[in-house]
Structure formats: C-alpha cells, structure tokens
Image (cartoon, grey):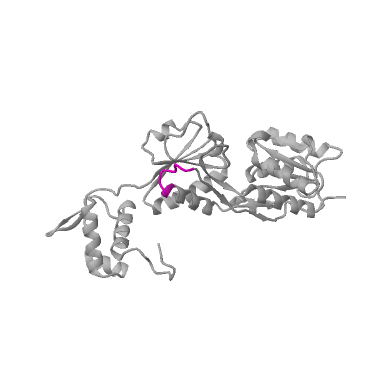
Amino acid sequence: MTRGDGVSSVPKHQLVADYIKGRISEGKYRIGEILPGERIIADELSVSRPSVKRAIETLEAEGIIECSPSIGSIVRRQVKESLLVGYLVPDLQDPFHLELIRELDILMHRHHGSLLVQQGIDDARLTGTGLTHLVKHHLLYDPSRPDRIPTVYTGPVPGPVSSIVSDVDSGMKQICEHLKGLDHARIGYASPFAAAQDSQYRSLVAALREDGLDLSPEWHFRVDPLDRHGCEELVSRIRDAPAPPTALVCYNDWLAIAIIKAARELGLDIPGRLSITGYDDLYVSSLLHCPLTTVRFSRKESARRIVDMLMRGSLTEPLTEVVETRLIVRESTREARA
C-alpha cells in the first residue's frame, strides 16, 4: 500500500510484523524456535530497532510469539490464515484452470492464505473444510442451490452473483475483423458446449452479422477437446466437404490445439486449407508447430481481480469484473484460398 509519491503508507512496525508473519507461514521460523535478535532483523530490513521492538510487541499481543527476557522471542503458534479459498472446476485437465490456479496460489501466499483445489461439481467436500471463500466454474452455477459461503464464479453467470469474465464481445469482434481482413467468408465454430450455454458463440454470431457474414448451422460443431474421435470426425467433415469453412473459431485454445493435432494426423493443412483461432492464449499456444492465433486475457490480472473481490468482504452485493482482451496473431491463420 503506497501513497501517490510511491512511499509506503503502512507504518514501519506493521511492515516488520508482516515480514515476520510471512517467515513463520513459510516455515523459516518454526514453532518453538527463537527469532533472530532485534538488531539482526533491523539490519536485514533497514529499519530502526524501535520499529522492530514495536512489531515484536504487536505479535506478542496477537499470541503468535512469546517474549522471554532471558531467552528472546519464541514462536508459539502458526499465523492464522486470513483467507482459505476453495477452487472448484469440473475438469482440471483444462490448462486454462491450471494457469489461473497457479496465479491464485501465488497471491494467496502473499496474503498468508491458502488455496484448496478440487475437481468435480459438488462443493460440499470443500465447504466442509472451513473455507472462507470459494471460486467456481461458471457452469456450476445453480440458482436452486444458493452458495453457502461468499463465491466468485469464473465466466459469465445468468444470475445475481459475483463473477470474473473476459471481454468476450471485444475478443470475438477482433477475431471476426481479423478473419474478414484475410477474406474469410465461410467461418465455422467449435465448442464443447451447447449454444444456449455458450456466450462466446452468441458474441461470435453477433460480430459476424455486424460484418455482413453468417455462421451456418452446418458448421457449428460441438466437440470436447478430450474426444479424439470427435475432433477427427470434425476434421474429416471439413476436409471432405465440397464447400467447407475456410476458418474455424474455437471456444478455447485447448480445443483448438486438439483440432490442430487431428488435422495434422488426417492431412488437413493448417492454415493452408483451414485457418484456426483459439481463445485464452495458453502458454503452450505459442510453442506449437503451427503457433495459434488466439485471444489473450491475462490470468495474472484475472487472479488479482478475484483476490481483490475476496478481500472486500462478504460479497453480498453481486459484482462482475471484466478483464480486457487482445487478439494475438500467429501462424494458424492466413488469407483464404480463392
């Protein structure tokens, strides 16, 4: 926390106390061990000994340490975590969630909190662990079962709850403008979800119509990235069709990568015969043999927004945070063939 001039507005003794708490949480100072002397801590942090002394007094008042004149400052208990956050997602194989979990875990550590991760659809096991907050995938929203603890959803939710979403409308508009600039007029779409559940599909259709284009129901594919046969069937249909789409917009990078793999195995040239776009900009997307054109929105920024929402308190007032998007153009898209 800083003032506008960049100088910390937090009292020096509080910074010292937070530092010591952090070292205790990390296991650097263990229960029963004696803290380094005040002079050593003061020199290490470049603060005055009175600031260290006051920090020690604060920690003693909180019961974290015990001061003995003949021994020193002894760690008596672990720092109580201010946040114990659960993360519930239907499928942890999705690399997007692994990347977001990593960023959340880093921030939880900074706030002396912990992140508990679970794959599934039922939060009963997580909420029984004494969680303070919960982060859930948007498909797990159930209006008939109100959340028992403050919850933030990842993705758009059709109800009065707090959520973190990417700017899908902007992302899909950028994809459409890019493909139209490459003279693609026949555009398909692939997603694991039905149209009614898929906000990206609706945004894509709206963006295409703005550009005077349409998405034929024939080229709206529903396929899961883990369904190898389904991905191969999709590729075969496009490869063998007399007038196939020249570009395929995928719900996310995970699915786009699965389709690119199937296309390579079945001899469909990407991007020669079919341009492909994703959504998420996973780390691996730039490392493919055909690097993926995709929409980027920062997992680090998403995690920061989620933690900010959690730190605000009970989340009794629904709040939606929108993370901006940006198209990253790579080799998986090129001009449509005549």
In the rendered image, which quarter contains the N terminus?
A: bottom left
Q: Is residue 337 above or below residue 228?
A: below
Tell whether position 312 is magenta: yes
The spot of residue 77 in percent (x, y) is 24, 48
- Residue at 44% across / 68% down in the picture? 4
- Residue 79 seen in the current view: yes
Taking the image as shown, residue 228 lies to the left or right of residue 69, namely: right
Query: In the rendered view, would you say 97 is above or below 120?
Result: below
Q: Is residue 169 left or right of residue 163?
A: right
Assign the magenta stretch its main secondary structure.
Answer: loop
Q: Which residues are magenta?
A: 310-317
Left or right of residue 47, residue 331 in this image: right
Compare residues 9 and 20 and report the one nearer the observer: 9
Quadrant of the rendered image containing residue 17: bottom left
Q: Residue at x 66, y 45 (%)?
A: 257
Q: Position of residue 332 (x, y in %)?
A: 72, 51
Q: Position of residue 154 (x, y in %)?
A: 54, 43
Q: Is residue 70 left or right of residue 338?
A: left
Picture residue at 56% right of the left edge, 35% below the top: 139
Residue 117's quadrant in the figure? top left
Instruction: Work out whether residue 102 or residue 298 is closer to the camera in this orientation and state it.
Output: 298
Q: Is residue 260 visible?
A: no
